[in-house]
Image: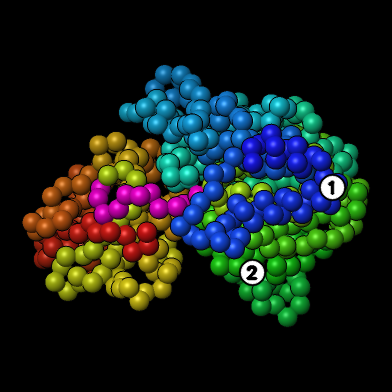
Amino acid sequence: MTNVMMSRFLSSLRPEKAGAALAIIAGLVAGNLIGLGPSHSLTIKERPCDIYAAGDTPCVAAHSTVRSLYAKYTGALYQVKRASDDATQEIGLLSDGYANAATQDAFCASTTCIITKIYDQSPRHNDLAIASGGTYKGPGPNGSLLGAAADALPVTAGGHQVYGVSISPGMGYRNNRTSGVAVKGQPEGMYMVSSGTHLNSGCCFDYGNAERSATDTGAGHMDTVHVSLWPNCSNEAAPGAHADNELAPGVHADLEDGIFHWNQRSCNPAATISGGLRPFISAWLKNNGVTRFALKWGDAQSGRLTTIYSGALPGGYAPMRQEGAIILGIGGDNIHDSAGSFFEGVMTAGYPVESTDNAVQANIVTAGYGAPTGLSGTLAAGSEISLQATTACCTGDYVRNRTGATVIAPVTSDSAKQDKGDSTWIVRRGLADNACISFESRNSPGDFLRHQNFALQLQPFDGTDLNRSDATFCPQPGKNGKGNSFRSVNYPTKYIRHYEGRIYIAGDGDGTNPWDTTTFWADDTTFIVSPPWSP
């Protein structure tokens, strides 16, 4: 059925029938109908904003650096600015609707770029630019915030390498002069695709409706979906009784002067994302503006939506008083202490029905976030690999992340899925030198192996020159005649080495640290580049 035929079919139905039809479409998209096995695939022409339009809740904002959010959108997704000469370049689309990241790579070669604009694909043209003004001034010129490094969040989607938006404290985007966004209690819905791995507890990683003045104007003047680390209350005897200080990824509503998991200020266990270290999540908020709101989350790689809360608005927030600005990665007053990842997001006019939400979630899953790159076991950019030790003691050990520290540890076919993923790396063009490479975590998009005080650890890439250099390594033939060794780009006499179970950069007797010892140096600095444990 063509897009036109589908639109005519849906428009001919009563609303409740159209919702049922959308649910069927969602099932088709997910490949769940009898007779459609895993070896079959469907050509997906509809995108989220086409589904919302069919549900009579059209998009008034549609932002993504990854893909088109309308089937027929042909414009630019975002704009980057080059550090070497301040020139700008718009990043458009490939024929299948995914970002043409090669344009960015060519334009930013031998220098660095930041994302300066994220274009709104809707007819409203509510583009996002780097935020400025407001209560909280940023570290940029005249108190503006900073733009995200354009190459900080390489991911795979639709079989292509593309780039998300990696927000660190001090960064954020805004549009105070929008068109069509809900105001003064009008209904609206929104979602964003984010990550459960690159977060902090700072305020506020928001996407949605905020104050036009970039100042706190009171309860109900914001309506944004919020993703952050939050106290995990899943084992509490009573709501709000914070039994421990463990932080877990969660989805919330930032309604100004309050971040809510439900209509109370106490903790709601359902707000925590189960299996929280999920590389791609969808976070959802919808609000009828007068009496009720709903929160949901989903795994953006598979599965259905989980409802966190659906019910009455908090006291003092009914009706809402939205002002219609749009923010990304910051609070309504431009507070910019948050960290997070953004891949796509949409805002609608009207309160979407459940079947529309489900159909959009199914469409997000088909986008192929984090799917295998198709390359493995080599040092080519985009290849997925594991790094096996060659020292006689440790040939069954692999370089892996373990709660922030980098170690070598045994991995086998019987190892847990998490352990296999933590031992899998994606080779990226060197963040400081394109002739070298950087290692991105398979389990944590946007997090790279980096040395600090000579010890390797996994950290989000923040775009700074020091971070770029610390996370860049130049492959050479293995020092013991096998595999490869990896020289630090900013410490050219030091190589990645395992020593007593940890990973460092080490010199061959030319340093004062224990791991600089010449004993086993050639073996300890040599690794076999093998196929990934978690393809």
Q: Which residue is drawn at 58% across and 35% down?
A: 68
Place of residue 84 in the rendered image (x, y in percent of width and height, measured from the top left): 39, 22
Q: In which quarter of the image is residue 413?
A: bottom left
Vertical placement of residue 423 versus 355, above or below: below
Q: Mark 2–mark 1 contact, CB under 8 Å?
A: no
Place of residue 291 in the rendered image (x, y in percent of width and height, measured from the top left): 90, 53
Hey, what amino acid is under mark 2?
A: Asn
Q: In the structure shown, which secondary structural element does the residue marked by tag 1 occupy?
A: helix
Q: Name the residue under label 2.
A: 232
Label 2 vs 1, first from the N-terminus: 1
The part of the chain drawn in magenta is 368-379
Q: Nearer the viewer, residue 11 or 525?
A: 11
Mark 1 crowdedness (10 Å alpha carbons): few <14, some 14-19, many ≥20: some
Vertical placement of residue 319 versus 312, above or below: above
Q: In the structure shown, which secondary structural element does the residue marked by tag 2 occupy?
A: loop
Magenta span includes 97:
no
What is the total number of numbered labels drawn onto the structure image? 2
Q: Mark 1 points at which residue?
A: 15
Q: Residue at x 63, y 74 (%)?
A: 244
